[in-house]
Image (cartoon, rainbow, N blue to C red):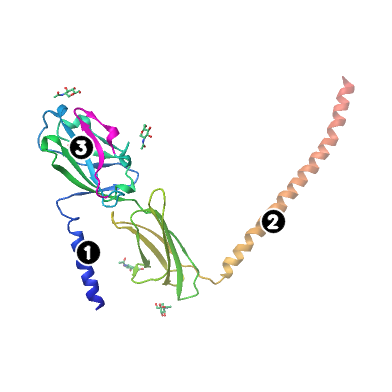
Amino acid sequence: MGWLKVFLLLVGLANCRRPRTTPAVPTVTALIGQGVMIPCSIPHRPTGLNESRIYWQASNPRSKKPHEDMVLLVYNRGKMENHLRTALYMNRTRLFPGQLHDGNFSLYIDPVKIEDDRAKVIVRYEKNDFKPLCPTYIRVTARNSKPAVHSSCTQGEGLVEVTCATQGGFPEPTFSWRIQNHTVLRPQEMTRTMERDPHSGTFSADLTVQLNASEGQTTTCLVTNPVLQETVSTSITIQSCKVDPQVNTASWLVPVALLVALVFVFLVALGAYKYRRMEYQVTPQGSTTSVTVV
Ligand SMILES: *[C@@H]1O[C@H](CO)[C@@H](O)[C@H](O)[C@H]1NC(C)=O
Ligand SMILES: *[C@@H]1O[C@H](CO)[C@@H](O)[C@H](O)[C@H]1NC(C)=O
Ligand SMILES: *[C@@H]1O[C@H](CO)[C@@H](O)[C@H](O)[C@H]1NC(C)=O
Ligand SMILES: *[C@@H]1O[C@H](CO)[C@@H](O)[C@H](O)[C@H]1NC(C)=O
Ligand SMILES: *[C@@H]1O[C@H](CO)[C@@H](O)[C@H](O)[C@H]1NC(C)=O
């Protein structure tokens, strides 16, 4: 029964997605904070550009007004009408005016914002009866920071709690774990926190799992960005809880050595001070004699 539900759900999802992933519409991947080119070229050199209009528009099912087209840029009879841009794209879009006459209608968006995600950009050109040209989806992403990994100590073989934290990624990262070079198939998950930065919209993720790892084994947390298919990872070595006597000796040897060094420096300083005082007592007599001579 459960499997049937899952199957129906998958079929439903596939149906929903079909219009979106029509292979005819290319997708450009854009990194938050960087620039992205929305390529558009018409196959012939346009004539009479100075008398015609070109609009760059976008629709986004995730925007506040999903059924309203947003204006990215307007070219009207030889001039850019920048004030007509939708607030979201104000000051963020430009094209290459020198290339317009070659039929290069490419648009540059800089810097990319999280709100650009899933936008479908089209170009409308008057000489083309404003039929949509160059439909392009924007997929926004951001790289995850190299994870910070910490573990509790372990007593021999057993479960170790390991925490892995990463920031700055978009969309939500996926985690995987390795002990030595074996992938952990189903780590026992303890806690997972996923927070969005209210300003940039990127994710901070923090995951704690229990792994069956023992002292000295290398544990790796791998964080993957699903859009870029890029993985960043950090490895740590599982530490033992036992207090190692050698480590113990070493730990009290250091302060003792420091103390000995301090006492030595003090004695040397004291010696120098006494020597100087003796010298000082001698010199005034010498100078008095020289004064009497003068
Ligand atoms: C279009 O206008 C620009 C400046 O407004 C001018 O330099 C150019 O010669 C014009 N081109 C045509 C084909 O009229
Ligand atoms: C766009 O730039 C102008 C001039 O640099 C500035 O006054 C304006 O506030 C900017 N608008 C936005 C929405 O960033
Ligand atoms: C259009 O112009 C941009 C900016 O100069 C350039 O990067 C791009 O390659 C051009 N596209 C074509 C098809 O020439
Ligand atoms: C951890 O793995 C070892 C063998 O590798 C096994 O003997 C032990 O029972 C496991 N411990 C737990 C808590 O699963
Ligand atoms: C895993 O590590 C062992 C030694 O620790 C090595 O012999 C083996 O080739 C490694 N396997 C892979 C797939 O890296």
- Residue 280 position, x and y percent, is 82, 35
- The residues tagged by marks 1 and 3 sit, at their Cα atoms, a distance apart of 33 Å
| Residue at 28% from the left image edge and 33% from the top image edge | 82
Alpha carbon distance from label 2 to label 1? 73 Å
Q: Quadrant of the C terminus?
A: top right
Labels 3 and 2 touching (C-beta < 8 A): no
Disc 3 on helix, strand or loop? strand
Foreground residue, 160 or 197?
197
Amino acid type, mark 1: Leu
> Closer to the N terminus: mark 1 or mark 3?
1
Residue 148, by quadrant, is bottom left
Q: Check residue 260 in the rendering and tell me which mark sits there, or answer none.
A: 2
Does residue 241 belong to the magenta stretch? no
Q: Position of residue 258 (x, y in %)?
A: 66, 55
Q: Name the residue nearer the viewer: 45 or 216.
A: 45
Which residues are drawn in magenta? 66-85
Dot 1 lies on which element? helix
Q: Is residue 282 above or below residue 219?
A: above
What residue did someone put label 1 on?
13
